[in-house]
Amino acid sequence: MSSLKLHQQRAQFSYSARVLVAFPVVCVCAIVAGCAAPQKTFTVERPVRHTVSTPHFVIQSDFQIPDDAPLVRELDQLRQQITETLALPGQRDPVVVYLFSDEESYRRYMHATWPNLPPRRAYFVGTSRELSIYSFHSARVREDLRHEFTHGLLHSSLNSVPLWLDEGLAEYFEVGGENVGTPHTSHVQYLQSARAEGWNPSLYHLEQLSDFRKMTQRDYAEAWGWVHFMLHNADSTRGTLIDYVAELESKSVAAALMPRLEKADPAYYNGMISHVTNMAQGIALASHRP
Ligand SMILES: [Zn+2]
């Protein structure tokens, strides 16, 4: 559903990962146990047998992927969508996607390389040497790669990306395929349930987050909600976000976004709540359509 990101020595090293929310507990246990006691005959290597190179990203895999495969075309289309939506500057570095053919090989590699990282379906790892994505072939690989590739593109174009915004944008671009901005159904429903239980959104709270391990499912849903609200509410809110992103190209420490949003739209708080409520009503209507 969502993703995580850890900042260690912020500029040099960062992680991001897909959460295994829907993964059965028994499978998680089996994976952890398997990683803790790898077979002696197993070699832990990155998948580098096959390579697809484009001007903006490289896919390395241990199974063949045609140059014109849907996955390759989708990532290139996504790159254009993100660049146009956020008016991103050019990439400084290509993003390298390491795609394993099976989950077990991926798990073993990740555990051997970063033993302290919790098991996730995909990771973005940014270092001063390379912006890398790790994942494996699965039914959800395209969604996972859309999410992680968003992180990769942001970090290859900007000097700093606040954690909440990094995740909010990745959640925003992971859905919809060609239709950027399609409501993230599970996030909308989660936020509506939270509202019914008395929860109130807080961009201030999100802007304080700096450790992905402390981000909750609600934080991911809310981060998505603020991004969707800003991009779709009005020219003023969209412009505020785009101007903010433009500043991140050169800033190593991001300023707070909330005061700017408040200035652009003094009714932003209720506006965000209404925005999500309207999406929830749209989803409910669509689900009741014969
Ligand atoms: Zn993420």
Image (cartoon, rainbow, N blue to C red):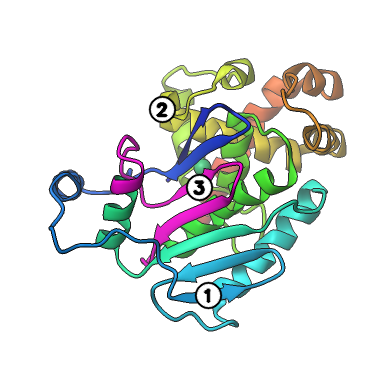
What whole-number distance in Å separates the C-alpha atoms at marks 3 and 1? Answer: 19 Å
What whole-number distance in Å separates the C-alpha atoms at marks 1 and 2? Answer: 33 Å
Residue highlighted by disc 1: 51
Residue highlighted by disc 3: 124
Q: Give whichever of discs 3 and 2 has the lower sequence position.
A: 3
Q: Name the image quarter holding residue 266.
A: top right
User: Is 125 a magenta residue?
Assistant: yes
Q: Secondary structure at mark 1?
A: strand
Within 10 angstroms of label 1, few (less than 14), some, or many (20 or more) residues?
some
Looking at the picture, how far across and down is residue 234, in whole percent?
82, 38
Q: Amino acid at mark 3?
A: Phe
> Residue 213 shows which numbered tag?
2
User: Is 275 a magenta residue?
Assistant: no
In the visual, does 183 lie left or right of 242? left
Within 10 angstroms of label 2, few (less than 14), some, or many (20 or more) residues?
few
Specify the segment rendered in magenta: 112-139
Q: Give whichever of discs 1 and 2 has the lower sequence position.
A: 1
Q: Amino acid at mark 2?
A: Arg
What whole-number distance in Å separates the C-alpha atoms at marks 3 and 2? Answer: 15 Å
In the visual, does 81 lie left or right of 289? right
Q: Secondary structure at mark 2?
A: helix
Q: Is residue 169 above or below residue 54?
A: above
